[in-house]
Image (cartoon, rainbow, N blue to C red):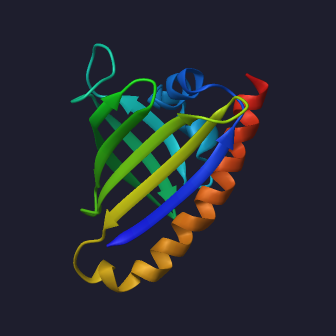
Amino acid sequence: MIHVQRRVRLDPPPPDVFAYLTDVERIPEWQAEAGIKRVTRTDSGPMGVGSTFRMERHAQGRTAGIDATMTLWEPPHRFAFDTIDDSRFVGRFDTKLDPAAGGGTDLIWTVDMQPPGLWRLMSPVIRRAIDKAADVDFANLQQKLARN
């Protein structure tokens, strides 16, 4: 199991951060380092538990599809989704948003991934790649939200 967690302070209040992050088609705007190129809703209606979307991720010279299902929906404080990609990597992404002292939002982002088969041997390398991408992508998120 790969476990990564980030704590980030953001200027906007939780409802604004929640709205931006759960507009899943905007994920590529701030997750470029993670290789997310496109996100498409695969259902209709308002976002909530059971909503589905597909991400297209390009990394290490290949493109993978990632199917995601929203599993937790508590506006404006928390949401989570489970993923499975074309290689059968299983993931859970959990985001918690709390009001920060003095204004803004304290974000806690947690990802747990289970690589399949022999991919498990690459877990330390995969974890480092997630860490590196998260550092860049959350800096991008801070800049993007500061401009909105």
Looking at the image, which is closer to me, 56 or 137?
137
Percent coordinates x, y for residue 104 in the rendering: 68, 31
| Quarter holding residue 89 | bottom left
Q: Residue at x 51, y 36 (%)?
A: 97
Which of the 4 image quadrants contains residue 43? Answer: top left
Q: Position of residue 74 (x, y in %)?
A: 35, 28
Q: For this view, does 9 lie left or right of residue 82? A: right
In the image, is residue 115 above or below residue 71? Answer: below
Residue 60 vs 55, above or below: the answer is: below
Would residue 81 appear left or right of 56 to someone viewing this image?
left
Whether residue 60 is visible, yes or no, is no
Q: What count of labels does the image hold? A: 0
The outermost residue toward the top is 45
Of residue 88 and residue 128, the one placed in the foreground of this image is 128
Is residue 73 something that shows in the picture? yes
Give the x, y percent position of residue 101.
68, 35
